[in-house]
Image: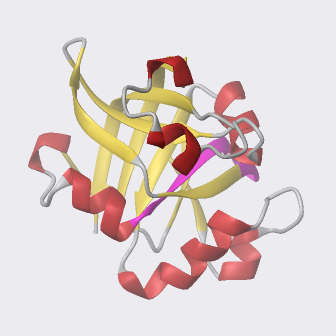
Amino acid sequence: MKKIDIKDLKGNAVSLFDDKWCLITAGVGENYNTMTASWGAMGELWNKDVCFCFIRPQRYTYEFTEKNELFTLSFFGEEYRKALSFCGTKSGRDFDKAKETGLTPMEIDGSVSFEESEIVIVLRKVAYQDINPEGFLDKAIDGNCYPQKDYHRMYIGEVVSCYVK
């Protein structure tokens, strides 16, 4: 992979999350977990290049994200849609996701990603905020996205590094 400045990343951030999906991965070595995400954002906050991602507390990846300073966002080509679907619907508590999907874990700048990734962004947690439904101005969000009232935690990560194939 080639290291680039995040500002040189080609494409549209909305399309990256919505169309490509990504894996959020936290942990080190063989002690990590990953999950699929299609919600997220990139931008500038507090004079830092940042990415936002969202993880529900019952997800196994939440535990790893809480314990580790670094995490990655890894984006894949369409040919990995089935693997990412598996990673989004099965728990790392019950399955070895890398083994089940054929993805190859790799250490990168103190965290974990996958060799098959087209784009990897390594992030350092700088803040988090639990989603509070009292803040929904569009009340349909609560019923449509949170029927079980299992609200996400939003993590804000400062970009440590960015890599592309």
- Looking at the figure, which quarter contains the N terminus? bottom left
Which residue: 75% across, 77% down? 99
Which quadrant holds residue 2? bottom left
Q: Where is residue 130 drawn, in percent x and y?
A: 57, 21
Is residue 100 shown above or below 19? below
The single residue placed furthest to the right in the displayed view is 94
Q: Main secondary structure of the magenta part?
A: strand
Which residue: 44% across, 57% down? 38
Which residue: 65% across, 67% down? 87
Q: Where is residue 14 drawn, in percent x and y?
A: 24, 54
Is residue 99 shown above or below 33? below
The single residue placed furthest to the front in the displayed view is 139
- Looking at the figure, which quarter contains the C terminus? bottom left
Is there any visible trace of residue 100 in the rendered image?
A: yes
Q: How is the image coloured?
A: secondary structure
Which residue: 54% across, 32% down? 70
Q: Where is residue 114 drawn, in percent x and y?
A: 52, 64
Q: Is residue 67 shown in magenta?
A: no
Which quadrant holds residue 135? top left
How many numbered marks does the figure carry?
0
Q: Is residue 28 shown in magenta?
A: yes
| Left or right position of 156 against 159 | right
Which residues, given as a range, are shown in magenta? 21-32
